[in-house]
């Protein structure tokens, strides 16, 4: 028996994991893991698998990539804060941050690959506009477990690994992120090709949740506030779920952290719906002129058109349960915040992380966050310059291409034969 079961928060059904992504009764809710171990014992592992007790895996991968938490001095002083902690998911070996692809997507990819190997059948298909795809390419390179990654052609150059690999089948799609998702869905109608699952994948959520776990064991308690830039909001959901587990453990306090989640204006669908008090995102109200709004943002990883916001156990529920807040951050504020952060802390940021820093500044200025409280700022990506000094960044060569508007039907047979050769 595996060391956890899955639970549907809607109907309460418990189930075994067969890389299950949704409730068999058809509930519109995110299924969760329930770990048999209520207390968290840290394993002797170099990276994220330190937290394997609360990851949906039995085996581990010896990867140094994992969450890192440290107490801020520079930015804390700059903002007049007394207890600012930074969760740094990127590359900064001087602080033991060893995520070579520089974003917390690697914290999702590692347990996902192990979960699939142990509970699923087939080869994972990932649609991505950048950071997620790169993280899964790297995981394939490190583990030798093949993946199919589908990206818009323009994003292909963002996909690199630190070592040469034959294990990535990169499909480029002439179109945008939505076209890549559609092509990936086409591919997954074929036996042997399996959708990774996104927010529905418990390994992704519990992988991201290790940022909260690492903070709690480092600080000694659950923080009062959690700040993150969101596109899908999966990281916010994950932080909430991890905090509930920590409360169940009993050693880290009994209160949930307030979630402070930020989007990059002008594309702010969740901010708009949340401020209107709505569980549902209305495209005509919350996502007006989506295409041009998406083109205008500084941090394009934050531009998800279908976030798990209203679904049971999703972002709306996470914000409601934690007394949370949402922030819209303008490009210029993100850039200013980035400058302040780089000067104060001495490491470069992913643009999305700059949005989170700007939201923290907003929250402190408006009094939403008391500068004396214990705050966890999730720096979801950074250290790109530092990583380029230490590692090769080998661009992944596309294997197949989908022409504009044609769908993946034409290349499915090629992808399947690639999978046969590489599995
Ligand atoms: C994907 C990503 C985010 C947004 O994460 P979600 O929780 O899935 O919305 C933020 N920052 C970086 C660097 C990312 O790659
Ligand atoms: Zn259910």
Image: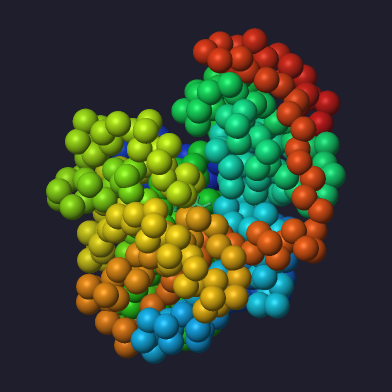
Q: Quadrant of the C terminus?
A: top right
Give the quadrant of residue 284.
Answer: top left
Give the image location of residue 287, x and y in percent.
28, 36
Give the image location of residue 155, x and y in percent.
61, 36
Q: Residue at x 81, y 53 (%)?
A: 392
Q: Is residue 110 above or below residue 69?
A: above
Q: Residue at x 43, y 67 (%)?
A: 337
Give the quadrant of residue 244.
Answer: bottom left
Q: How many marks?
A: 0
Q: Residue at x 55, y 57 (%)?
A: 350
Give the image location of residue 322, x and y in percent.
27, 66
Residue farthest toward the left in the current orientation of the protein = 276
Q: Is residue 273 above or below residue 305?
A: below
Could you tell whether 165 is left or right of 321 in the image?
A: right
Give the quadrant of residue 106.
Answer: bottom right
Could you tell whether 60 is left or right of 373 in the image?
A: right
Could you tell whether 161 is left or right of 341 in the image?
A: right
Q: Is residue 105 visible?
A: yes
Q: Is residue 27 visible?
A: no
Depth order, front residue of 82/47: 82
Q: Residue at x 50, y 31 (%)?
A: 177
Give the image location of residue 16, x and y in percent.
51, 46
């Amino acid at each position: 028996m595996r060391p956890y079961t899955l639970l549907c928060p809607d109907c309460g059904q418990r189930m075994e994991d067969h890389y299950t992504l949704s409730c068999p009764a058809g509930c519109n809710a995110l299924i969760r893991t329930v770990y048999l171990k209520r207390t968290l014992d840290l394993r002797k592992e170099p990276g994220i698998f330190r937290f394997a007790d609360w990851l949906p895996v039995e085996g581990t991968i010896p990867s140094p990539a994992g969450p890192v938490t440290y107490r801020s001095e520079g930015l804390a002083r700059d903002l007049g804060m007394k207890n600012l902690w930074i969760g740094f998911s990127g590359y900064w070996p001087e602080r033991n941050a060893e995520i070579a692809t520089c974003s917390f997507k690697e914290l999702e990819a590692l347990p996902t690959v192990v979960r699939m190997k142990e509970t699923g059948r087939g080869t994972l298909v990932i649609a991505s506009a950048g950071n997620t795809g790169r993280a899964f390419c790297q995981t394939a390179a490190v583990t030798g477990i093949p993946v199919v990654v589908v990206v818009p052609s323009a994003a292909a150059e963002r996909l690199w690994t630190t070592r040469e690999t034959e294990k990535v089948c990169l499909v480029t799609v002439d179109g945008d992120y939505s076209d890549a998702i559609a092509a990936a869905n086409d591919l997954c109608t074929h036996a042997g090709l399996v959708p990774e699952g996104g927010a529905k994948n418990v390994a992704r959520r519990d992988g991201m949740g290790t940022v909260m776990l690492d903070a709690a064991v480092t600080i000694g308690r659950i923080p009062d506030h959690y700040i993150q830039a969101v596109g899908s909001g999966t990281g916010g959901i994950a932080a909430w779920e991890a905090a509930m587990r920590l409360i169940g453990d009993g050693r880290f306090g009994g209160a949930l952290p307030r979630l402070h989640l930020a989007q990059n204006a002008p594309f702010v669908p969740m901010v708009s719906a949340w401020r209107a008090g709505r569980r549902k995102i209305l495209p005509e109200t919350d996502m007006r002129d989506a295409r041009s709004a998406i083109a205008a943002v500084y941090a394009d990883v934050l531009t998800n058109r279908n976030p798990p916001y209203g679904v049971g156990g999703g972002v709306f529920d996470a914000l409601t349960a934690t007394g949370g807040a949402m922030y819209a951050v303008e490009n210029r504020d993100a850039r200013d915040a980035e400058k302040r952060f780089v000067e104060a802390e001495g490491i470069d940021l992913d643009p999305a992380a700059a949005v989170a820093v700007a939201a923290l500044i907003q929250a402190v200025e408006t009094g939403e966050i008391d500068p004396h409280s214990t705050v966890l700022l999730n720096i979801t990506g950074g250290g790109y310059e530092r990583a380029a000094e230490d590692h090769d960044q080998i661009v992944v060569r596309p294997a197949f291409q989908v022409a504009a508007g044609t769908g993946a039907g034409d290349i499915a047979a090629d992808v399947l034969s690639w999978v046969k050769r590489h599995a």
